[in-house]
Image (cartoon, rainbow, N blue to C red):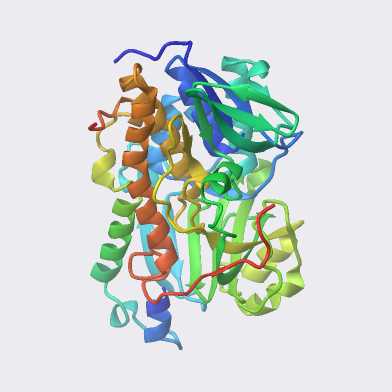
Amino acid sequence: MLLVEQRAPDGFVDVADVITAEEIARVTEDYRRTAGFSLASLQRGTSLLDEPFPA
Amino acid sequence: VRGVDRDLGCVVIGAGIGGLATALSLHEIGATVEVFESVRELRSLGVGINLLPHAVRELDALGLLDELGARSVAPSQLVYCTRRGQEIWREPRGLAAGYPWPQLSIHRGVLQEILLQALIDRVGTEALHLGQALVRIEQVGDRPRAVFEDGRVDADLVIAADGIHSVARAQRFSQEGPPLWNGSLLWRGVAEIDPVLDGRSMIWAGHPEQKFVGYPIADLPGGRQLFNFIAELRRPESDLATREDWNRKGSLEDFLPSFEDWDFDWLNVPAIVRSASETFVFPMVDRDPLPRWTFGATTLLGDAAHPMYPIGSNGASQAILDARVLAGCLRRDPDSPRDALDRYESVRRPATAAIVQANAASGPSCPCCWSSSVPRTGLSTSPT
């Protein structure tokens, strides 16, 4: 969001001129993965209580 | 996978979200558990928080999803916009994004109340000891002993979930000092308003220097909603940043003037702020990741282990994940509980360190910033 403020401090007509959807999607997906809740990681229904963590 | 022996006596320090989730999870695997909390009365402190789908999955496994769902709001989308209200991006959240579990926005006090009631129902009131302030953890023979101001208890395992001002953490890392402040202050409050957008939207407006985050946390009769908000300002010179506390009152004049022109046609920030009966002020603080959480039969959990900036809905969610991994490791390794604690740490410490660092960097990996890094300093007031 700071990136958008820096690139367009007075606002914009079309946000695509400021930041691409791909840029934002990459950032938000990276964060989901870091925080452990990417969509792919939750498709298995296993609770962490049953997760076979390696020794 | 068999459960642990009921003779495995576990002491949990702290009856916050992480401590209660830990106690319920330990009870679920068959351990004996007691919770020791420093306050004499548990009150509904805090404002709104978010539970991410992976944490909700664990609360569902604990049999709490129905009650949580009835007392929260499941956001359908997150809308990012500028300080002028221009939309930058919106993305679906929770079930709307295809997750098998919802994201839940809920009052922290309500979540704590639900966890506490479950503990009382399942384990009994005798498992909860209020007014027990931890002084230190000792080792007596091969067992840990939790020493309180007016008593002590020996256990097989001690799990310290005593928050960002953790006594157990300070005992092990006495040179660490106060939490690190990045120069931003957060004013948090809850207002009763008409729904914004679809009434299921989280809103992030502005940028790291000045930001407003809001989301509904409860539906009210008549169509109104309780709307949680966080107004954030960079104020590195402020004397308000003394200590992180859930119960520190804020003043409108300290922050509202900066948001007076944030009246968009779809979101009126000053009106929402004025609707709140009270606000609470918090410094944006965290601590650096630790090199170690586990010492023999004692370990850290939740904010005691990995306090992080409240960005990205992670605080309570990560504490719940800690609790479940800890209990899962004990269940898989019931004959070697100390090895299980080591395994818990090996899973959770690097995972949470990555989030602490992502939130602190305020950089490209942080979803609300996407740029730049802000230095942090120690608070002027030491934890007490």
Residue B344 position, x and y percent, is 36, 35
Q: Looking at this rendering, what residue extends furthest in the bottom direction?
A: A10
Q: Is residue B203 left or right of residue B100?
A: right
Residue B351 position, x and y percent, is 34, 48
Residue A47 position, x and y percent, is 34, 29
In the image, what residue occupies the spot 48% across and 46% down?
B305
Q: How many numbered callouts? A: 0
In the image, what residue occupies the spot 45% across and 18% down?
B28
Name the foreground residue: B185 vs B206: B185
| Quadrant hosting residue B154 | top right
Q: Is residue A47 left or right of residue B143?
A: left
Name the foreground residue: B67 vs B283: B283
Q: Is residue B1 left or right of residue B3?
A: left
- Quadrant of the drawing holding the N terminus of chain B: top left
Name the foreground residue: A48 vs B127: B127
Residue A36 position, x and y percent, is 32, 47
The answer to whether residue B108 shows anywhere in this view is yes
* B276 over B70 or under it: above or below: below
In the image, what residue occupies the spot 76% across and 74% down?
B253
| Quadrant hosting residue A13 | bottom left
The answer to whether residue B328 shows anywhere in this view is no
* A7 over B312 or under it: above or below: below
Q: Looking at this rendering, what residue extends furthest in the front direction?
A: B141
